[in-house]
Image (cartoon, helix red, strand yellow):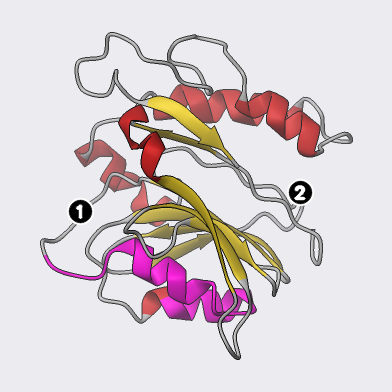
Amino acid sequence: VVGHGLVAQNWDNDPALDDFTVVLTRHPEGRPSLTTVTQAGLIAYIGFNAAGLGACLNTLPAPSRPRGVPHYFTLRDLYEQDCLEDAVDSIRRARRAIPANIILTTPQGPANLEVTIDDIHILTDPQSGRLTHTNHCLHADLLPINEDFPELIQSYPRKHRIDHLIEASPESLSVESIKDALRDHQDHPRSICRHSNDDPDTGFWQTVFSV
């Protein structure tokens, strides 16, 4: 909703990183104050600023390159902006090393940015004002990428499940109903709220925090 937004996510990672996770608030001169959930040594991550920009981030399996700007730095610059257009421009300026997905709440409404190393594809939903994303490409121009990269931690069923939970409460969507969705345990341990399991590649990943 324009002028009133909410952005939320689970963060799935190796729980060994818990001791290094911090909530950091900065007050730069001449720029919006910002609060970010990050890890020691990373300049910025998931967070929001005083101008009404909030960002959640998740991995997007897609081509990468060995040299370039990590998304921690592009996010730090994003938090110095005050509108969707400038936020997109701040990411576009960087020669990016890796892809990422960024869901934004902005003064102009919600937007989902599928950020590849070469471009930014923007998804919006003016009708419902709601966007969801897991760990695969949704923009029509990027769908072929999904065929070249394996599904990451059951991305498709988690997208289907979160959409079902959000659509089930169209008139009562709130902080509490979103918390309920993020702690959902259908298909446990490979659920939206993820627990360690026997997957040989990502079974050690767990939901370590929600924002």
Picture residue at 52% right of the left edge, 42% below the top: 133
Q: Can residue 165 be seen in this view?
A: no
Residue 87 in magenta? yes
Residue 203 appears in the rendering:
yes
Density class for disc 1 (Cα within 10 Å; few <14, some 14-19, many ≥20) is: some
Relative to 204, is 34 on the left or the right? right
Q: Write the start and end of the magenta stretch as one range.
A: 67-90
Q: Residue 28 in the image: x percent, y percent? A: 56, 82
Magenta segment's dominant SS is helix
- Badge number at residue 63: 1
Could you tell me if the residues under marks 1 and 2 are in contact, i.e. CB atoms within 8 Å?
no
**What is the distance, in whole Å, between disc 1 and disc 2 at their CAs?**
31 Å
* Three-letter code, disc 1: Pro
Identify the residue position indicated by label 2 in the image.
128
Q: Position of residue 174 (x, y in %)?
A: 82, 38
Q: Is residue 3 magenta?
A: no
